[in-house]
Image (cartoon, grey):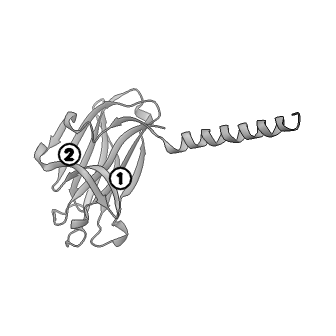
Amino acid sequence: MNRSLPLILIGVAIAAGAAYFWLRSGREHVAVDLVSQFANAKRKQPSPEVFTQESATIGGVSHPAIESTQPSRLTYNLTVPEKGLLKVSLGILEKGWTMEGDGVLFRIGVSTGGRYDELLSLVIDPFHNAGERSWRDLSIDLSEYAGENIDLIFNTNPGPPPSDNRNGDFAAWGAPRVVVQ
């Protein structure tokens, strides 16, 4: 029995370590699921009718999504948790990939205390760039706003400024959520 005790302890240690890494790596703590909170968004511009909520598949990967086919602004009011991180996947729906256009300008910003901070400005153009025919997964650190009540703002605009080419602009915000790191 003395010889088996070290083997049992090693086995328990390995199992505990594996369980720790499995639990830690496979799960994220979602503080705010912005797709499920769509009805409670503070602003939907130019009107709520320009948005749709559904599962969107881009490049064979599906996400619950908020879609817009024209320039839009979606604003959520929320309190940022400690170690808050915005996770979102950006993309153009596949039906827009072969329509000649100049892509969509995705912008994300935070408004708080009378100031606006732009956190992201990114053009996705799958017509000209085949490498952009997939979701673009992003993580944006919100920890500098921890504990603050903010407006989190999602904008879509026609391709790079000063463009107003809206051809093929089938923008999708995939699984937008605020998680705790």
The residues tagged by marks 2 and 1 sit, at their Cα atoms, a distance apart of: 17 Å
Quadrant containing the N terminus is top right
As shown in the figure, which amino acid type bears the numbered disc 2?
Arg
Tell me if 175 is positioned left or right of 10 in this view. Answer: left
Of badges 2 and 1, the one in the foreground is 1
Question: Which residue in the protein does label 2 denote?
Answer: 73
Near mark 2 (Cα within 10 A), the count class, few <14, some 14-19 or many ≥20, is many
**Secondary structure state at the residue bearing disc 1:** strand
Tell me if 151 is positioned left or right of 51 in this view. Answer: right
Q: Position of residue 51 (x, y in %)?
A: 17, 48
Q: Residue furthest front?
A: 1
Q: Give the residue drawn at x 37%, y 69%.
A: 131
**Secondary structure state at the residue bearing disc 2:** strand
Near mark 1 (Cα within 10 A), the count class, few <14, some 14-19 or many ≥20, is some
Q: Give the residue drawn at x 72%, y 37%.
A: 13
Q: Is residue 142 above or below residue 90?
A: above
Q: Residue furthest right?
A: 2
Instruction: Using the rendered view, name the quadrant where residue 62 is placed.
Output: bottom left
Q: Give the residue drawn at x 88%, y 38%.
A: 3
Question: Which residue in the protein does label 1 denote?
Answer: 89
As shown in the figure, which amino acid type bears the numbered disc 1?
Ser
